[in-house]
Amino acid sequence: MFGLPIPILHWIVQYGIGLILFTLVLRAIASWFGLDERYGFFRFLASYTDPFIKPVRRLVPPIMFIDVSFMITMFLLYTLMVLLLQALPPTW
């Protein structure tokens, strides 16, 4: 009755966190191929994803040579997205 015709808040949560998850995946794949912050696009990805990765990286050290902070950050962001989408009324 009072809901919006387009669920704007759902879109913001779903596509906003989805975009962050996508950039995390791009940055992880780029690190496998040795593409680092020398290139402008990957410098942008690093500046966009570092606020999410650095707190986790401070808490969880790398295991051997594998940085698991990417996977933990992706899991936490996906869990946050699912919980927020379940908590919102469907017409918001």
Image (cartoon, helix red, strand yellow):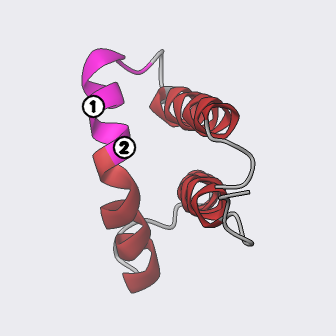
Residue 30 lies, with reference to residue 58, above or below; the image says below
The outermost residue toward the bottom is 40
Instruction: Tell me whether the residue at label 1 lies in contact with that at label 2, contact meaning CB atoms closer than 8 angstroms.
Output: yes
Work out whether residue 32 can be spotted.
no
Q: Position of residue 8 (x, y in %)?
A: 62, 67
In the foreground, 59 or 40: 59
Tell me the magenta residue range: 52-62
Number of residues whose C-alpha sits closer than 10 Å to that of mark 1, classed few (under 14), some (14–19) or many (20 or more)? few
In the foreground, 55 or 79: 79
Residue 72 lies, with reference to residue 47, above or below; the image says above
The C terminus lies in quadrant = bottom right
Looking at the rendered structure, the kind of residue marked 1 is Pro
Q: What SS does tag 2 mark? A: helix
Q: Residue at x 34, y 17 (%)?
A: 61
User: What is the chief secondary structure element of the magenta stretch?
Assistant: helix
Residue 25 lies, with reference to residue 79, above or below; the image says below
Q: In which image quadrant can residue 89 be found?
A: top right
In the foreground, 13 or 56: 13
| Residue 61 included in the magenta stretch of the image | yes
Q: Which residue is mark 1?
A: 55
Q: Position of residue 15 (x, y in %)?
A: 64, 62
Q: Residue at x 65, y 58 (%)?
A: 2
**Does residue 22 appear to the left or right of 65 in the view shown?**
right
Q: Which residue is mark 2?
A: 52
Looking at the rendered structure, the kind of residue marked 2 is Phe
Q: Position of residue 68 (x, y in %)?
A: 51, 26
Q: Position of residue 48 (x, y in %)?
A: 37, 63
Q: In which image quadrant can residue 40 be found?
A: bottom left
The N terminus lies in quadrant = bottom right
Work out whether residue 59 can be spotted.
yes
Q: Residue at x 46, y 30 (%)?
A: 69
